[in-house]
Image (cartoon, rainbow, N blue to C red):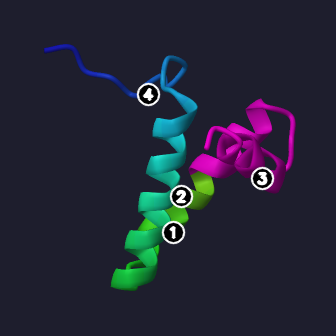
Amino acid sequence: MRKFDKISIQEMSKEDMLMIIKALEYTGANTNIQAFLTLRDNILKELASLAESSENEFLAYLNDSY
């Protein structure tokens, strides 16, 4: 098996990415495990940076799928 330091998400759909972000937020809020919220924030921050937008703008973009 090949080992990876990083995984690309370039082929992931907007809907799947939004579901991951919402799942991390829901889990963090309902379990009080800060690591889930931190991971959500880090993913969102990185994706917003790549899209050259704010985190709120990027979330709005993902939510436009629905």
Residue type, label 4: Lys
Q: Earlier in the sequence, mark 3 or mark 2?
A: 2
User: Which mark's residue is nearer the viewer, 4 or 1?
Assistant: 1
Q: Earlier in the sequence, mark 4 or mark 2?
A: 4
Real-space Cα separation, disc 3 to disc 1, in angstroms: 14 Å
The local secondary structure at tag 2 comes to helix
Local crowd size for mark 1, using a 10 Å CA cut-off: few (<14), some (14–19), many (≥20): many
- Range of the magenta residues? 43-66
Magenta span: predominant SS is helix
Q: Is residue 65 magenta?
A: yes
Q: Which mark is residue 62?
A: none
Local crowd size for mark 4, using a 10 Å CA cut-off: few (<14), some (14–19), many (≥20): few
From the image, tell me which residue sits under label 2: 40
Q: Are marks 1 and 2 in contact (CB under 8 Å)?
A: yes
Real-space Cα separation, disc 3 to disc 2, in angstroms: 11 Å
Q: Which mark is residue 55?
A: 3
